[in-house]
Image (cartoon, grey):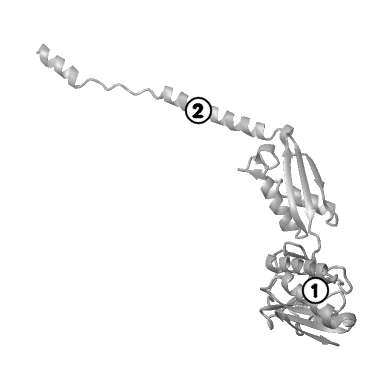
């Protein structure tokens, strides 16, 4: 009977209840630590000590100073991850400021952004310089003789011509270019163009510079214009400062055809240089010319 009672107690022994109190305390400690860490990070990130407060901008000439400062400030405003200020030194994006300023001002070609610990931001900009005047999509025929005719230089959008930088980017409307010191590049091949984007290839601009240099060296004349026309896809029309024009092949080095030009001027044209209408240099040593 005793044995049976022992077995009954053993079989019906009450189960021990689990104690969750240590687990709860540990969880609370972890959560408290995380909250304290987040608050500490928030406080640290928002310390005025390393918030960008001193912004120095230089290099601008025609861009409005207030507008430039406002454009620099825009990427700095706001928060990263909703609690870290973008103006915080370690989270400030120099590249974002650079791209934003260039997007806002197509007249600005180069932007250098540098932050200096703990609260200084230095921005140096370089405005685009006018290399030439770009006249796209003539309503009349794309001939260089029409370039001084106001009616001949209106584009499809009703605008006229544009300032062109050395990198081929058009960045501003040209109000009045007649008699300008800048050369003129006319183009009726490409009717689509966007302000702030390249409109003329480096190949064309390099050719113009090489042609101008070769012409000065051989003859002393200066190029005043270059015409790109779909009517002569293998050639360029080059205007000179004396009012006459050259028709030259695009694929031939300027040093070659400029030598032929000097020869024909010295041997045939001579003192009648002011009476020239054009000189055709597309056929090697066979040079054709016409007086007015």
Residue 30 bears which disc, if any? 2
Viewer-side residue, 71 vs 235: 235
**Is 127 placed above or below 215 here?**
above
Q: In this view, does 252 lie above or below 25?
A: below
Q: Which residue sits furthest front?
A: 267
Q: In which quarter of the image is the N terminus?
A: top left
* Whether residue 192 is situated above or below residue 72 in the rendered picture: below
* Contact check, label 2 and label 1, Cβ < 8 Å: no
Residue at 87% x, 80% y: name it: 270
Identity of the residue furthest to the left in this view: 1
**Res 97 label:** none
Q: Where is residue 129 in the image (x, y as percent from the top left)?
A: 81, 60
Q: Where is residue 146 in the image (x, y as percent from the top left)?
A: 82, 82
Q: Nearer the viewer, residue 83 or 130?
A: 130
Give the quadrant of residue 174: bottom right
The reply to whether residue 172 is visible in this rendering is: no
Mark 2 or 1, nearer chain start: 2
Query: Residue placed at 77% from the left, 63% from the top?
Result: 165
Mark 2, secondary structure of its residue: helix
Tag in front: 2 or 1? 1
Residue beneath label 1, please? 225
Residue 72 in the image: state x and y as whole percent: 75, 49
């Amino acid at each position: 009977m005793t044995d049976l009672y022992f077995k009954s107690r053993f079989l019906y022994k009450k189960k021990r209840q689990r104690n969750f109190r240590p687990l709860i305390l540990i969880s609370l400690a972890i959560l408290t630590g995380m909250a304290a860490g987040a608050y500490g990070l928030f406080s640290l990130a928002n310390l005025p000590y390393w918030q960008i407060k001193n912004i120095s901008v230089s290099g601008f000439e025609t861009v409005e100073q207030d507008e430039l400062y406002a454009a620099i400030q825009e990427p700095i405003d706001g928060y990263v991850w909703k609690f870290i200020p973008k103006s915080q030194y370690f989270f400030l994006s120099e590249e974002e400021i650079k791209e934003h300023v260039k997007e806002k001002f197509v007249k600005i070609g180069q932007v250098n952004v540098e932050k200096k610990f703990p609260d200084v931001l230095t921005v140096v900009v370089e405005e685009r310089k006018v290399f030439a005047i770009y006249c796209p999509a003539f309503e009349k025929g794309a001939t260089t003789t029409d370039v001084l005719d106001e009616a001949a230089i209106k584009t499809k959008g009703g605008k006229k011509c544009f300032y062109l930088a050395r990198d081929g980017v058009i960045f501003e409307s040209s109000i009045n270019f007649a008699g300008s010191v800048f050369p003129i590049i006319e183009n009726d091949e490409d009717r689509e163009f966007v302000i702030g984007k390249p409109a003329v290839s480096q190949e064309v601009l390099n050719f113009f510079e090489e042609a101008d240099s070769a012409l000065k060296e051989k003859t002393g004349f200066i190029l005043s214009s270059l015409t790109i026309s779909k009517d002569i896809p293998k050639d360029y029309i080059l205007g000179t400062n004396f009012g006459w024009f050259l028709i030259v092949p695009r694929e031939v080095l300027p040093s070659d055809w400029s030598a032929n030009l000097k020869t024909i001027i010295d041997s045939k044209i001579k003192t009648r240089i002011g009476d020239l209408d054009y000189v055709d240099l597309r056929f090697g040593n066979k040079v054709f010319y016409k007086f007015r």
